[in-house]
Amino acid sequence: MNIDRAYPKCKYHRTGKTTIVKDVDAEAALGEGWGDSPGGPSGLQDDADPFQRFDTWGLECLRSDARGRIRTGMANAHAGVIESGPDPDSRVRQASMRKVFGIFAEEYLRAGLLTESMMDDSIPRMVYDAAVSGGWQTGSLARNGGCTLQFGHYWVPPDVPKMLTKLLQGEVWRWRGELEATPGSFEPRTSRTSGLKRMQPPAALASPKVDSPEHGHRQDDKLVAERAARRGPQVPGGAGQRVQPSTIQRPR
């Protein structure tokens, strides 16, 4: 008989609560906000870092200064989470995910690469990757009783796509308006989906090979490459610079 010597174990919530779990499924069922140590005033673990998956997101289609702005924006969002303390109702963490969505959308729009499908699928996946590695939301590198859906680079609770649909709805509409107002945007309205439909888990998702981290990016990568080829090389401040998006107010 195999005995899992990792259990029982004590788990700590960022609000100060503690509990004992007897197995991996009980641990996964705790949900968001629990860790293996008290985690300090912010409730985050020592290894919390929203940049852990940054180099896997295929951002090479963006200029280095754009990637730098994304990193700066993500760092500011993470700083907000740290400064929020325990954040018992997760409002700051949710606001940080909306901010990060807007950061990605703005840079893709500046580059002339933003599409409706990116807002529906690949950008939310990157946002949730950052949220899991940063300690803002629940996710696991291995499937367990609470994380049964592979989404981006992590196994996550099955209600994550539905949660993101609701959380990011305002940002999607905000950047949809920016996209339609930007000269050169040619994606027809009839091809667009309502909400984050492509994020819903397919029936065959029981196998992790079905929805690999790269699966949701393939169509976007092809379109981004085609647009980048048409756009040609961009020199900072040169004639090839795309029209900048209008200045809009994002939630702080």
Image: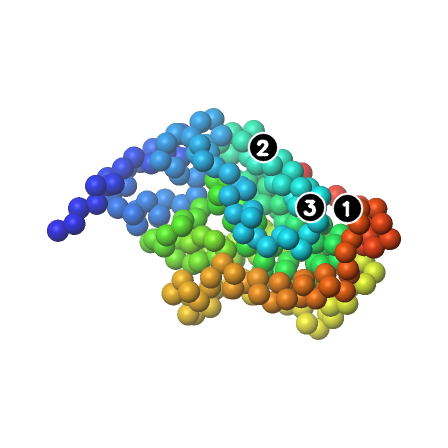
Foreground disc of the pair 2, 3: 3
**What numbered label is drawn on residue 248?**
1
Q: Is residue 164 visible?
A: no
Q: Amino acid at mark 1?
A: Ile
**What numbered label is drawn on residue 109?**
none
Q: Earlier in the sequence, mark 2 or mark 1?
A: 2
- Which element type, helix, strand or loop, lies under badge 3? helix
Q: Is residue 7 above or below residue 214?
A: above
Rendered residue at 43%/39% (across/down): 33
Measure how far apart labels 2 and 3 are at the Cα level. 22 Å
Measure how far apart labels 3 and 1 are at the Cα level. 23 Å
Q: Earlier in the sequence, mark 3 or mark 1?
A: 3
- Which element type, helix, strand or loop, lies under badge 2? helix
* Residue located farthest toward the bottom when viewing the structure as drawn: 190
Residue 16: percent from the left, percent from the top? 40, 29
- Which element type, helix, strand or loop, lies under badge 1? loop
Rendered residue at 56%/29% (across/down): 83
Rendered residue at 42%/30% (across/down): 39
* Neighbour tally class for label 1: few under 14, some 14-19, many 20 plus, Cα within 10 Å: few
Q: Is residue 155 above or below residue 39?
A: below
Look at mark 2 in the image and give the residue it sits on.
Answer: 79
* Image-based side of 65 in relation to 198, left or right: right
Rendered residue at 58%/58% (across/down): 122
Callout 3–callout 1 Cβ contact below 8 Å? no
Measure how far apart labels 2 and 1 are at the Cα level. 22 Å
